[in-house]
Image (cartoon, rainbow, N blue to C red):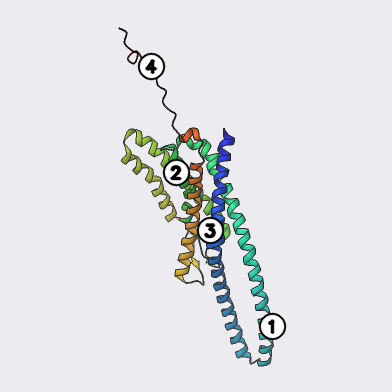
């Protein structure tokens, strides 16, 4: 039984990983590469301005001309390296997206779904989507309340040593919020009705937002325009939503036929249906 759940989760992860990998290759990687070029150009412009100011202050005309030739040569080599690096990055991103989908499918829709399915409210067709929502909140939604996605090249005030445990802590808080919401909904649905159940299920997510208010602030500074930074953040968020949505849809479609089709009613003959004897 467990092997069937795990196989179904991995298959859904393969589908979602393929879709997410194509999204990364076709949409996300070119835009991220464009943002990297803008950051690189901003750094080069800042460096050239500093060099020109230094040469002007020291009056080294001849040496400046010689350095300029070396700079152009290094720029041409740098552009070639950047092109190769972008191609490698794109291939790695596609492979990593597919692998990440398999990991998520096996962990959430294989192992976790095997144990949590009886406690997930709603009909069987909706349980996959509720699991997908819980997975998104756990892996992305809750941590993003404190550490939202940042544009390439942006500097963050919190160190990596601080961000990693903070991200892990918010993942744990997101998982607990989802479990608490499911428990509250089930208990209140039986005793107080649908409206009270929905309100009770929303309370843990409200507490999650309150918890994020007391987390340390992570100031982000980058060379990109605010519009482009906002677009990149939205793109990253859309990619994660897309991956979890495809995971849930594929997992729902892969339900065994015995679960997706109701068993036909077996007619029974009673004394009322028996022909009356003369």
Q: Nearer the viewer, mark 3 or mark 2?
A: 3
State the residue position of label 2. Answer: 130
Label 2: state its secondary structure: helix
Q: Nearer the viewer, mark 4 or mark 1?
A: 4
Q: Residue furthest top?
A: 278
- Mark 1 is surrounded, within 10 Å at the Cα level, by few (under 14), some (14 to 19) or many (20 or more) other residues, namely few
- The foreground one among 47 and 81 is 81
Quarter of the N terminus within the rendering: top right
Q: Is residue 147 visible?
A: no
Name the residue located 51 percent from the left edge and 39 percent from the top edge: 113
Q: CA distance from mark 3 to mark 2?
A: 23 Å
Determine whether, in the image, residue 207 is placed left or right of residue 58.
left
Which of the numbered marks, if any, corresponds to residue 208?
none
Q: Nearer the viewer, mark 2 or mark 4?
A: 4
Determine whether, in the image, residue 176 is placed left or right of residue 65.
left
- Mark 4 is surrounded, within 10 Å at the Cα level, by few (under 14), some (14 to 19) or many (20 or more) other residues, namely few
Residue 241 x, y percent position in the rendering = 47, 53
Q: CA distance from mark 4 to mark 1?
A: 97 Å
Q: Are marks 1 and 2 in contact (CB under 8 Å)?
A: no
State the residue position of label 3. Answer: 23
Sequence-wise first label, 4 or 1: 1
Which of the numbered marks, if any, corresponds to residue 70?
1
Label 3: state its secondary structure: helix
Label 4: state its secondary structure: loop
Sequence-wise first label, 2 or 4: 2
Quarter of the C terminus within the rendering: top left
């Amino acid at each position: 039984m467990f092997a069937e759940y795990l196989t179904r989760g991995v298959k859904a992860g393969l589908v979602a990983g393929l879709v997410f990998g194509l999204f990364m290759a076709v949409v996300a990687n070119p835009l991220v590469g464009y943002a990297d070029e803008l950051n690189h150009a901003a750094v080069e412009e800042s460096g050239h301005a500093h060099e020109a100011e230094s040469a002007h202050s020291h009056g080294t005309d001849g040496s400046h001309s010689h350095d300029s030739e070396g700079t152009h040569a290094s720029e041409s080599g740098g552009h070639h390296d950047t092109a190769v690096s972008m191609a490698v990055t794109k291939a790695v991103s596609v492979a990593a997206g597919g692998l990440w989908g398999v990991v998520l499918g096996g962990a959430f829709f294989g192992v976790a779904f095997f144990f949590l399915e009886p406690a997930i409210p709603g009909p069987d067709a909706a349980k996959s989507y509720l699991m997908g929502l819980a997975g998104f909140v756990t892996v992305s939604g809750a941590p993003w309340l404190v550490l939202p996605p940042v544009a390439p090249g942006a500097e963050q005030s919190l160190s990596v040593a601080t961000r990693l445990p903070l991200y892990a802590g918010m993942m744990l808080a997101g998982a607990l919020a989802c479990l608490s919401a499911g428990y509250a909904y089930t208990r209140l649905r039986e005793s107080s009705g649908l409206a009270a159940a929905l309100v009770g299920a929303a309370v843990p997510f409200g507490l999650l937002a309150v918890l994020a208010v007391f987390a340390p602030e992570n100031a982000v500074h980058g060379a990109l325009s605010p519009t482009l930074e906002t677009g990149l953040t939205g793109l990253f968020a859309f990619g994660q939503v897309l991956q979890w949505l495809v995971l849930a849809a594929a997992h729902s479609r892969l339900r065994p036929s015995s679960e997706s089709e109701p068993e036909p009613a077996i007619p029974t003959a009673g004394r009322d249906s028996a022909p009356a004897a003369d």
